[in-house]
Amino acid sequence: MKKTLKLAVLSVFAGLGALYATSCAAPLPVGCLYTDITMPGTIGNGDFKANRHGSASCYSILGWVAGGDASLNQAAYNGNVDHVAWSSFKATNYFGIYGIYTTVVYGTGKEFGPDMTLAPSNATEQK
């Protein structure tokens, strides 16, 4: 009985030690089965006036295949934002199999036509 109790206690401590050693902190809160978070971005001029927003996404499958463009530049372009006020980041992951990661920017901008780009206003047009 005494030997069985020692073995049980030792097993519990070994299991807890293994669990502690294998767990790690991540820069983002990640759920084992499902993740759906929105985090603040690290860009912006602090102005809280925004008349438009844009987003850009990328994906990951099993951590083996990833693609897409979730850059701030692409998000600003997609939303016709030329002055970024703030940004945010959204991550959704299903069972660690498929993940979607989205950057969203908020700011102001002019109305762009289909053939216009986000070039600076002092840029000269080449003919």
Image (cartoon, rainbow, N blue to C red):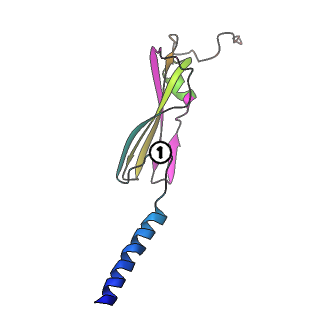
Residue range of the region highlighted in magenta in the rendering: 47-72
- Total number of numbered discs in the rendering: 1
Q: Residue furthest left?
A: 1
Considering only vertical position in the picture, is 31 above or below 103?
A: below
Q: Is residue 5 left or right of residue 23?
A: left
Magenta includes 56? yes
Q: Residue at x 50, y 54 (%)?
A: 64
Which x, y percent locates residue 77?
54, 23
Q: Residue at x 42, y 74 (%)?
A: 14
Report the residue marked by disc 1: 28
Which x, y percent locates residue 125?
69, 11
Q: Secondary structure at mark 1?
A: loop
Q: Residue at x 54, y 20 (%)?
A: 46
Which x, y percent locates residue 92?
39, 42
Considering only vertical position in the picture, is 37 above or below 77?
A: below
Which x, y percent locates residue 21?
48, 65
Q: Residue furthest front?
A: 2
What type is the residue that disc 1 sits on?
A: Leu
**Nearer-the-camera pick, 89 or 115:** 89
**Nearer-the-camera pick, 19 or 83:** 19
**Nearer-the-camera pick, 100 or 108:** 108
Q: Few, some or many C-alpha atoms within 10 Å of disc 1 (few <14, some 14-19, many ≥20)?
A: few
Magenta includes 106? no
User: The C terminus is located in which quarter?
Assistant: top right
User: The N terminus is located in which quarter?
Assistant: bottom left
Displayed quadrant of residue 53: top left
**Nearer-the-camera pick, 38 or 54:** 38
Considering only vertical position in the picture, is 17 above or below 6?
A: above
